[in-house]
């Protein structure tokens, strides 16, 4: 029971009586009923990579359409559907779940916990997310994809302008928001309450901090869009008038509700990538993160101010000069904490003993590419400039630099960095470097010319353009770049598969890294730690290796770990919730009493499964 | 499910506090409803009701939910979002509500803002009640307007406003257009010919007719000027003007 | 139990079920607060934004309906006052339920929970009557912006009350079959937090939607 110095090599494996393994479910049943944060994390990551490929395929298809002027490869409606689904997939089904995967797998390890605070709720979140993603994609089969753009502006999403795709879209997104809400509450409690002794908030790794910040962003920004989606659904199903201009409704309401969510969402996408980069740079520069506290506080500040900038997406909607000025000011202010972070990363690299394995390459390339995107974003903060650039390819270039060059590169870096922890095997560095250089080339080839396209007047979301518009060269470059990026991503997926099966074995700590997760085995055992670490600095594992060592609390004889057991209930409950939403969609196809029958059945199902859930032995 | 198990032995019952709180809540709610039956306090209704609602909220959160004497972290995760929600309501309100100008200016000029008459014109409910609420009386008395007209020599400001706001229906020379605005240069009026009446008509419009209420577009002074100009046109009888509509009044 | 069990009361009742129970992890309790209570407060923070958005929508469209009936024409202060009072008092009975549970009187706690759920049902009943009444005065969901915003906002509040009633009845059932003991009174306390929150949302709606309409 007393504290002692950690000596991993001589640490005895706990005797069987010391912890209870989960009952022997194997194979598919194990994955369906698991409440283990590590398995759920891997499920999230795999789903994210799958939808990344789907979204990429959609992008390549419409890039082919845009390659040459007056192309007839896709029709306008198909083009719109692919563009909408590309954005929806990338934002909600690729980057967010990959982030959730990192959060699930890493956060409990980083804080020295054995699992998240509510393991069954965690499982519910995943299945509800999966259901929501399937509902959105089911639109391809039932009546065509939504084609109103990913931010679904009213009245384009109204019943008279768009088909059943929008029904699937709003219903699926509503499910995703329920899933995100549950996950965010779960992770806030986990990070605040399950930290190991001594792990004060300022000793929390930056990635853990960014995960905490985005959980607050999710918890507080999803309700407005949930309301917006519900109003949209009511308009479409019951004929309410929220976005019905002829009855006094105002499409600006949707814009406000959407962007109240939409802008914090942007930070939900980028902050985890910033956190990953902040974890990777110190390891490969062999220096502690420069100004860690400043990096953390600037992340908090970005999250907070992120709620006060939403209307900069609406400068062209005629809000009046006072509102324009106010939102321009808050938007410009956000550049300050972002700049703080960038300078801190540079400060970390300055004078470091740098090595460049694949994760470091992605992390280093994140900095300039993200800065490019950030600077063009700062230009949009000025309303007069924004009026020119609004809805042009300049904006497309801006947010792809931020989201592909920023968020996605950060997540790639994270996958390469943490893959040994996920699977126990290293990813191939050779293939990784092929991936990195081709992806970087494709990325810049696609999106850099789009700055020029935007300045030359090419609007977003047009499915073709005339030859005399002089846009053909840059568009052709973009298409070639997109194909290169697609090929690079395939290399990445191939690398993952091959390395998972036969990669080089990794020990506990292949990178000589500094945070708690590297104390565990690779992959970690079900109970994560056989001991309770005591954290006395921001870099406990470097303390352990390079100073007098770190203290732990070893379990006393006769004590056992109490790991939560597997459960079917979360999946069943989430199944009924999804059924409830499918019932609403049925109303579109089979009007009549089906809505009420399915609602009643699934409502009772939800109540019953929740009762069964809470009745499980504690 | 719980992190720290509850210890029954060390717990002291709060029954008395809760009972007191329930009585306070009852009294305040009764006061809220009772307030509405005291017309003398009408100017203070809104602030008083808001204060009482916030007080009730604070009492429920503070005693029933024990936020007041619980851990800081609960206050952080609850009160900060509540503040954000209030700010959100306020900012969205700022941007759409006319009485929140100048923030609201942008949208008011867009199609969403309609006069009350347009908003309720097609409704079948209590037009009188709406009219009583909606109509804004002229800010001077009838005598003062008459005196003002007598002392006014220069009608050019009113003429300018006429050109911008009235001429599209009443013609630039005031002769009126078929099916739209009546002739303003004859001696006939549908809604009264005194300056006071004209100000009233311009301010509030005419329900069910094309004459819209100008109070949301012109300020009081501008309406006065345009009304004086309209009054000055009486009896000019321009060529090609519409036939007499409404009651004849004495020329000049 | 975990290695730092010394910091938390020693609790081994999970072993009754062969150690395969579902108790959420208790070993590292850094903030010294129950997980479920922290989760509830966080969730209620999120709910603030949810109802905030609905109320903002109501204000967004206040007085923008292009056809009647007007709020003042359909609202009935008597009915709403009674239902408001019932909901307010249900908060009182809920507080008593939590108090009884924490004092170890689980039977009393169960009874108060049922009484609270009953009050909630009465409130929902009043709301159903109110909707029915308004509908017959010509205000449907599709009639005007007032109809759309009013029914949606109060309807979602009513749905929250209904969920709360189910929640409380589940708690009562779990108390009844001994699955919630006094040591885990925090479960009832958390249900109570949700219930009080639904009550304060109604305090806001009652004043800002109903009373201020009469104050004009």
Image: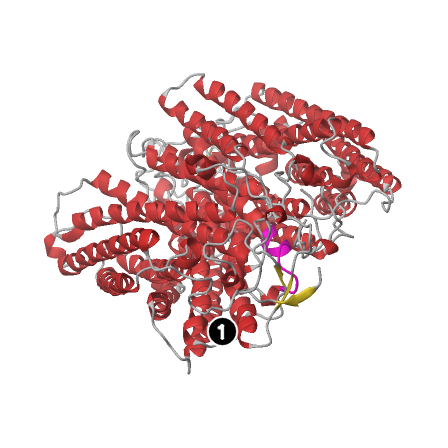
Vertical relation: B129 (above or below) A45: above
Q: Residues within 10 Å of mark 1 (few under 14, many from 20)?
A: many
Q: Residue at x 56, y 69 (%)?
A: A540
For this orientation, the residue located farthest to the top is A593
In front: B238, or C3? C3
User: Is residue B3 in sight in this rendering?
Assistant: yes
B96 vs A64, left or right, is: right
- For the magenta stretch, what is the residue range? A189-200
Q: Residue at x 61, y 38 (%)?
A: C20
Q: Chain of mark 1?
A: A
Quarter that holds the C terminus of chain A: top right
Quarter that holds the N terminus of chain A: bottom right
Vertical relation: A360 (above or below) A617: below
Is residue A19 inside the magenta stretch? no
- For disc 1, the marked residue is A289
Vertical relation: B11 (above or below) A516: above
In front: C28, or B40? C28
Q: Residue at x 49, y 47 (%)?
A: B227
Q: Position of residue A563 (x, y in %)?
A: 59, 45
Which quarter of the picture shows residue C150? top right
User: Is residue B114 in sight in this rendering?
Assistant: no
C6 vs B118, left or right, is: right
In front: A371, or A452? A371
Q: Position of residue C51 (x, y in %)?
A: 59, 41
Vertical relation: C172 (above or below) A324: above
Which quarter of the picture shows residue C95? top right
Q: Residue at x 66, y 35 (%)?
A: C17
A358 vs C130, left or right, is: left
Q: Secondary structure at mark 1?
A: loop
For this orientation, the residue located farthest to the right is B16
Is residue A196 inside the magenta stretch? yes
Q: Position of residue C201 (x, y in %)?
A: 66, 39
């Amino acid at each position: 029971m007393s504290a002692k110095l950690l000596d991993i090599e001589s640490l005895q494996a706990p005797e069987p009586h010391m912890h209870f393994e989960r009952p022997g479910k194997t194979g598919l049943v194990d994955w369906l009923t698991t409440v283990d944060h590590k398995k759920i994390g891997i499920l999230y990551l795999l789903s994210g990579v799958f939808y990344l490929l789907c979204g990429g395929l959609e992008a390549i298809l419409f890039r082919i359409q845009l390659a040459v002027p007056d192309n007839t490869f896709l029709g306008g409606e198909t083009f719109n559907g692919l563009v909408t689904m590309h954005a929806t997939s990338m934002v909600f089904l690729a980057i967010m779940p990959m982030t959730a995967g990192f959060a699930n797998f890493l956060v409990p390890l980083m804080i020295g916990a054995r699992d998240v605070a509510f393991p069954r709720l965690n499982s519910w979140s995943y299945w509800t997310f999966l259901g929501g993603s399937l509902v959105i994609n089911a639109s391809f089969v039932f009546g065509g994809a939504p084609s109103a753009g990913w931010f679904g502006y009213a009245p384009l999403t109204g019943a008279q302008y768009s088909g059943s795709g929008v029904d699937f879209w709003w219903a699926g997104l509503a499910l995703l928001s329920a899933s995100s809400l549950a996950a965010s509450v779960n992770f806030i409690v986990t990070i605040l309450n399950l930290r190991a002794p001594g792990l004060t908030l300022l000793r929390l790794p930056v990635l853990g901090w960014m995960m905490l910040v985005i959980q607050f962003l999710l918890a507080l920004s999803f309700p407005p869009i949930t309301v917006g989606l519900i109003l949209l659904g009511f308009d479409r199903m019951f004929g309410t008038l929220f976005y019905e201009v002829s009855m006094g409704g105002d499409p600006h309401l949707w814009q406000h509700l959407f962007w109240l969510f939409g802008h914090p969402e942007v930070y939900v996408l980028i902050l985890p990538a910033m956190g990953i980069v902040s974890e990777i740079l110190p390891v490969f520069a062999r220096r502690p993160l420069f100004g860690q506290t400043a990096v953390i506080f600037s992340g908090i500040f970005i999250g907070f101010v992120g709620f006060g900038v939403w209307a900069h997406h609406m400068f062209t909607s005629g809000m009046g000069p006072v509102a324009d000025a106010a939102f321009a000011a808050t938007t410009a202010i956000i550049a300050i904490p972002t700049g703080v972070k960038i300078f801190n990363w540079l400060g970390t690299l300055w004078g470091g003993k740098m090595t460049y394995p694949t994760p470091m390459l992605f992390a280093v390339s994140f900095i300039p590419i993200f800065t490019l995107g950030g600077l063009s974003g700062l230009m949009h903060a000025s309303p007069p400039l924004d009026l020119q650039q609004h809805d042009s390819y300049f904006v497309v270039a801006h947010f792809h630099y931020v989201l592909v060059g920023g968020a996605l590169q950060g997540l790639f870096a994270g996958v390469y960095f943490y893959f040994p922890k996920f699977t126990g095997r290293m990813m191939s560095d050779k293939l990784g470097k092929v991936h990195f250089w081709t992806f970087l080339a494709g990325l810049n080839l696609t999106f850099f010319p789009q700055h020029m396209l935007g300045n030359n007047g090419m609007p977003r979301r047009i499915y073709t353009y005339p030859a005399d518009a002089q846009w053909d060269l840059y568009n052709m470059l973009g298409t070639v770049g997109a194909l290169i990026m697609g090929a690079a991503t395939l290399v990445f997926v191939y690398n993952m598969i091959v390395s998972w099966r036969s990669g080089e074995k990794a020990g506990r700590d292949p990178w000589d890294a500094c945070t708690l997760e590297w104390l565990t085995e690779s992959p970690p055992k079900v109970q994560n730690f056989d001991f309770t670490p005591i954290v006395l600095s921001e870099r406990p594992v470097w303390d352990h290796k390079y100073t007098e060592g770190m203290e732990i609390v070893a379990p006393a004889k006769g004590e056992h770990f109490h790991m939560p057991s597997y459960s079917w209930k979360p999946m069943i409950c989430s199944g009924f919730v999804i059924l409830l939403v499918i019932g609403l969609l049925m109303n579109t196809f089979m009007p009549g009493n089906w809505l009420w029958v399915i609602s009643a059945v699934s409502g009772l199902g939800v109540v019953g499964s929740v009762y069964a859930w809470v009745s499980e032995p504690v | 499910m719980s992190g720290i198990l509850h210890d029954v032995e060390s717990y002291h019952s709060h029954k008395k506090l809760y009972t007191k709180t329930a009585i306070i809540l009852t009294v305040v709610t009764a006061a809220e409803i009772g307030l509405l039956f005291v017309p003398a306090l009408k100017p203070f209704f809104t602030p008083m009701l808001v204060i009482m609602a916030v007080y009730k909220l604070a009492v429920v959160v503070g005693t029933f939910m024990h936020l007041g004497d619980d851990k800081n972290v609960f206050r952080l995760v609850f009160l900060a979002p509540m503040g954000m929600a209030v700010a959100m309501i306020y900012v969205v309100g700022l941007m759409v509500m006319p009485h929140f100008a100048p923030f609201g200016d942008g949208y008011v000029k867009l199609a969403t803002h309609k006069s009350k008459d347009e908003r309720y014109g097609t409704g079948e409910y209590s037009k009188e009640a709406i009219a009583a609420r909606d109509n804004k009386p002229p800010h001077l008395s009838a005598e003062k307007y008459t005196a003002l007209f007598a002392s006014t020599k220069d009608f050019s400001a009113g003429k300018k406003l006429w050109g911008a706001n009235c001429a599209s229906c009443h013609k630039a020379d005031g002769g009126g257009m078929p099916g739209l605005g009546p002739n303003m240069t004859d001696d006939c009026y549908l809604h009264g010919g005194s300056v006071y009446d004209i100000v009233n008509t311009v301010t509030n419009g005419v329900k069910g007719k094309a004459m819209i209420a100008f109070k949301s577009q012109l300020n009081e002074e501008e309406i006065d000027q345009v009304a004086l100009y309209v009054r000055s046109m009486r009896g000019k009888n321009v060529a090609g003007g519409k036939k007499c509509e409404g009651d004849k009044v004495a020329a000049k | 139990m975990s290695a730092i069990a010394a910091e938390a009361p020693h609790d081994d009742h999970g072993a009754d079920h062969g150690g395969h129970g579902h108790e959420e992890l208790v070993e590292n309790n850094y903030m010294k607060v129950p997980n479920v209570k922290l989760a509830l407060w966080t969730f209620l923070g999120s709910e603030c934004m949810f109802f905030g958005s609905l109320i903002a929508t109501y204000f967004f469209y206040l007085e923008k309906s292009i056809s009647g009936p007007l709020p003042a024409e359909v609202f009935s202060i008597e009915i709403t006052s009674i239902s408001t009072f019932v909901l307010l008092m249900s908060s009182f009975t809920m507080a008593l339920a939590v108090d009884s549970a924490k004092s170890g009187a689980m039977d009393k706690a169960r009874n108060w929970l049922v009484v609270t759920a009953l009050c909630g049902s009465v409130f929902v009943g009043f709301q159903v009557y109110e909707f029915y009444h308004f509908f017959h005065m010509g205000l449907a969901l599709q009639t005007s912006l007032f109809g759309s915003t009013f029914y949606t906002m109060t309807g979602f509040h009513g749905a929250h009350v209904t969920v709360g009633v189910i929640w409380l009845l589940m708690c009562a059932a779990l108390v009844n079959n001994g699955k919630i003991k006094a040591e885990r009174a925090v479960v009832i306390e958390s249900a109570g937090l949700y219930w009080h929150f639904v009550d304060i949302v109604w305090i806001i709606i009652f004043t800002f939607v109903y009373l201020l309409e009469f104050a004009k």
